[in-house]
Amino acid sequence: MAIPVVSALGGHRSAAWLTAIVFVEVAILAFNRWCCPLTAVAARYTEDRRSNFDIYLPEWLASNNKLIFGTLYIAGALFALVNWWRVSS
């Protein structure tokens, strides 16, 4: 949620850095077959395998977090790109 806010406030360089940081996290997930590397660590300490056993989110949100937060990330990055393009033209 910070990417479009920072961009709207004129922090285009900061918005680009935030976008890049999240992209690195997405790349790590992609290389790990869309599973957080820390899930295996958490799995050693519990038998629970619900969607939210390793994350402090409601189960409905944990089971849909890639779709929900991925959509927000893409929308925020596109907003920042359009906002930067509009200001720089």
Image (tube, helix red, strand yellow):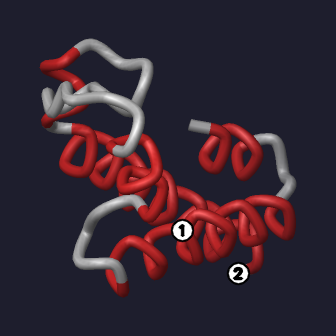
Tell me the residue that label 1 is attached to. 25
Sooner in the amino-acid sequence: mark 1 or mark 2? 1
User: Outermost residue toward the top?
Assistant: 58
Residue 67 tag number:
none
Q: Amino acid at mark 1?
A: Glu
- For the C terminus, the quadrant is bottom right
Residue 74, how many percent across, how many down? 38, 61
Q: Amino acid at mark 2?
A: Ser
Tell me the residue that label 2 is attached to. 89
* Mark count: 2
Nearer to me, 51 or 20 = 51
Q: Is residue 60 above or below residue 25?
A: above
Residue 86, how many percent across, how many down? 63, 69
Residue 34, how many percent across, how many down? 25, 69
Nearer to me, 48 or 19 = 48
Relative placement, left or right, of 36 versus 38 is left
Mark 1 residue crowding within 10 angstroms, few (<14) / some (14–19) / many (20+): few
Q: Is residue 69 above or below residue 48?
A: below
Residue 26, how many percent across, how many down? 44, 71
